[in-house]
Image: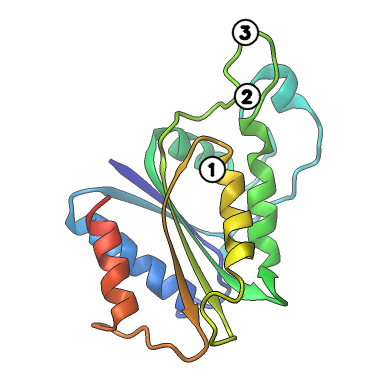
Amino acid sequence: MKVVAVLGSPHADGPSNVIAKEVLRGAKEAGHDVVIYEINKMNVKGCQACGVCKKNYCDCIQNDDLKPYWKDLHEAGALVISAPNYCSQICGPMITYMNRHYCLVSNLPGKAPVRVHPGIKLIGVFSQGWDKADAYLDTYKWYLGDFQNRDMELQDILVHAGNMPYDEGSELMTRAYELGKNL
């Protein structure tokens, strides 16, 4: 199975990236192919509401670094998304990334309402400064809900809160690894 990961932290060693990579380590060890996109290193434009995707029942036509992502997403069995929480919200580049999935829904007669195969397994990994792990859970559910509206199936939400340990062998990292291993 192909596992696509979209990492949203500008910090390569930030908690959301490190924990997501542990999910991916488990997935690789289970024999899955992993493709990683690091949003902070990419040229990703926001949705332009051009309507081409709606009129032509196609993926987003913008010529930016998400171009290869659409093919990978259509082939994926799982999607791992990670993002830090800034100002009580998902970081901006990951909101832009989420909005680009507008191209996957349609209301054209005779066409399926969602243009990606159903059942893609979805895992969200988030980090926040507040040590109350469930403080922003509604925000994370809202964000992942947009992907669930594209017929993806939420497997779990991992939250790194405050100074929670995320080193090798920690409870959070063990949970992340097992999630990936059991995809």
| Mark 3 Cα-neighbour bin, 10 Å: few <14, some 14–19, many ≥20 | few
Which mark lies nearer to you, 1 or 3?
A: 1
Which three-letter amino acid code belongs to the residue tagged 1?
Gln
User: In this rendering, is residue 157 above or below 103?
Assistant: below
The x and y percentages for residue 46 are 74, 49
Q: Are marks 1 and 3 in contact (CB under 8 Å)?
A: no
User: In this rendering, is residue 47 above or below 131?
Assistant: above
The x and y percentages for residue 16 are 48, 73
Which mark lies nearer to you, 3 or 2?
A: 3
Which three-letter amino acid code belongs to the residue tagged 3?
Gly
Q: Quadrant of residue 104?
A: top right
* Distance from the alpha carbon under mark 1 to that under mark 3: 22 Å
Q: Quadrant of residue 120?
A: top left
In front of the other: 144 or 37 = 144
Q: Residue at x 40, y 35 (%)?
A: 119
The x and y percentages for residue 139 are 64, 64
Which mark lies nearer to you, 2 or 1?
A: 1
* Distance from the alpha carbon under mark 2 to that under mark 1: 19 Å
Residue 60 at least partly seen: no
The N terminus sits in image quarter: top left
* Residue marked by disc 2: 58
Q: Is residue 79 left or right of residue 147?
A: left
Q: Which numbered marker is on residue 148? A: 1
Q: Earlier in the sequence, mark 2 or mark 1?
A: 2
Residue at the far left: name it: 30
* Distance from the alpha carbon under mark 3 to that under mark 2: 15 Å
Q: Which numbered marker is on residue 156? A: none
Q: Secondary structure at mark 2?
A: loop
User: In this rendering, is residue 123 above or below 2?
Assistant: below
* Residue marked by disc 3: 110
Q: Is residue 52 left or right of residue 23?
A: right
